[in-house]
């Protein structure tokens, strides 16, 4: 399980990522990544928020992937385990949603880890990459 600070849980946060995030697609899943603003709304520009805030990860998996909740939950557990391994290498201040596609039913944990790592690198969230100057 991911630490509480690294979980994307609220519908409003998912919607923000879907509407404003950049997209990357792989064979088994796609990824949406949104860099949270560094200053709070209506707050002082001198106060940094996202720079020190942890990256949050959410997983979206629909019934098209599998009708059985047991299968969908197994896939979510495997993706969470892969995300937990990559967590120390992620840049802070990002919201990420992993969207699972049908070919993921036949995957194992190492395949999820490899694909998630590739997608995060392509989205420039992994290894300290940053998208533009948002500071």
Image (spheres, rainbow, N blue to C red):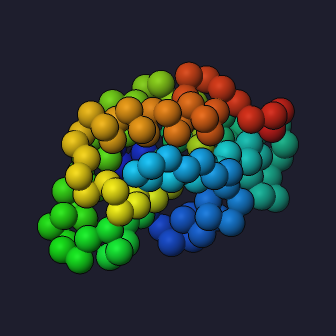
Q: Please indicate whether residue 22 sits to the left or right of residue 15 in the image.
A: right
Nearest the eye: 120 or 65: 65
- Asked whether the viewer can see residue 59, the reply is no
Number of marks present in the image shown: 0
Q: Quadrant of the C terminus?
A: top right
For this view, does 91 lie left or right of residue 2? right
**Which residue is located at x 32 percent, y 54 percent?**
104
Position in image of residue 112 (x %, y %): 33, 41
Q: Is residue 90 above or below residue 45?
A: above
- Most distant residue in the left direction: 70
Give the x, y percent position of residue 81. 27, 40
Give the image quarter of residue 117. top left
Residue 70 sits in quarter: bottom left
Compared to residue 75, the image places residue 119 above or below, namely: above
Vertical relation: 95 (above or below) 68? above
Q: Give whichever of 74, 48 is nearer the camera.
A: 74
> Residue 115: horizontal and vertical position, in percent?
42, 38
Q: Quadrant of residue 42?
A: bottom right
Question: Which residue corresponds to the image point at 62% horizontal and 39% vertical from the top-left?
Answer: 123
| Residue 86 seen by the camera | yes
Which residue is rendered at x = 74% and y = 52% of the image?
40
Q: x and y percent of residue 69 in the render?
A: 20, 72
Q: Residue at the location (35% across, 74% down)?
A: 64
């Amino acid at each position: 399980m991911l630490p509480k600070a690294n979980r994307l849980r609220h519908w409003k946060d998912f919607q923000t990522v879907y509407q404003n995030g950049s997209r990357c697609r792989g064979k088994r899943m796609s990824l949406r990544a949104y860099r949270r603003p560094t200053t709070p709304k209506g707050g002082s520009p001198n106060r940094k928020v996202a720079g020190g805030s942890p990256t949050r990860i959410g997983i979206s998996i629909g019934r098209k992937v599998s009708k059985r909740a047991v299968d969908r939950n197994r896939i979510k557990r495997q993706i969470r385990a892969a995300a937990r391994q990559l967590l120390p290498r992620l840049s802070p201040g990002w919201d990420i949603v992993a969207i699972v596609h049908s070919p993921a039913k036949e995957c194992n944990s190492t395949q999820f880890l490899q694909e998630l790592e590739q997608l995060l690198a392509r989205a420039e969230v992994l290894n300290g990459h940053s998208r533009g100057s948002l500071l």
